[in-house]
Image: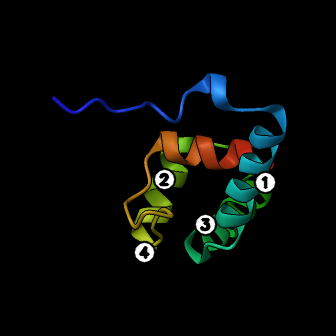
Amino acid sequence: MKKTKKLATTRNFTQEGRISGLEIFKLNKNSNENWRRAKTFIEHFHMKNLYINLPEIAKALNSNGYKTRGGSKFSAITVKNQYNLFV
């Protein structure tokens, strides 16, 4: 039986590695066209209506053809996660 070595565990991460990973995540997120378009839509919805209703925003995003970074439809949770990243 072949033995394998576990390479990636949380013990292997340094603080610098965590910071670098977060920066790469933010760069990838901000460079995604779907994310930028949806972010702008959510911001305009918030300014126009002066409130945040996650299910309503998700429904509006989906009916206007917006997709998540992965190409899926929006749910209230994905809107919440996205909104929390830039508030």
- Identify residue for label 1: 23
Residue at 38% across / 59% down in the picture? Answer: 73
Numbered disc 4: secondary structure: loop
Residue at horizontal 41%, vertical 31%?
Answer: 5
Identify the image quadrant of residue 14: top right
Residue 85 badge: none
Q: Answer whether labels 2 and 1 touch (C-beta < 8 Å).
A: no
* Residue at mark 2 to residue at mark 4: CA–CA distance: 11 Å
Q: Which mark is residue 65?
A: 4
Residue flagged by tag 4: what amino acid is it?
Gly
Of the residues under marks 2 and 1, which one precedes in the sequence? 1
Query: Of tags 1 and 4, which is closer to the observer?
Result: 1
Q: Observer-nearest residue: 15 or 61?
A: 15
Q: Amino acid at mark 2?
A: Ala
Quarter holding the N terminus is top left
According to the picture, the residue beneath numbered tag 3 turns out to be 35
Residue 71 in percent (x, y) is at 40, 67
> Dot 2: what SS?
helix
Give the labeled residue for mark 2: 58
**What's the CA distance linking mark 2 and mark 3?**
13 Å
Q: Is residue 53 visible?
A: no
Q: Is residue 26 visible to us here?
A: yes
Q: Nearer the viewer, residue 7 or 49?
A: 7
User: Tag 3 or tag 1, which sits nearer the N-term?
Assistant: 1
Local crowd at mark 3 within 10 Å, few (<14), some, or many (≥20)? some
Question: Which tag, 2 or 4, sits closer to the chain's start?
Answer: 2
Question: Residues at badges 1 and 3 in contact (C-beta under 8 Å)?
Answer: no
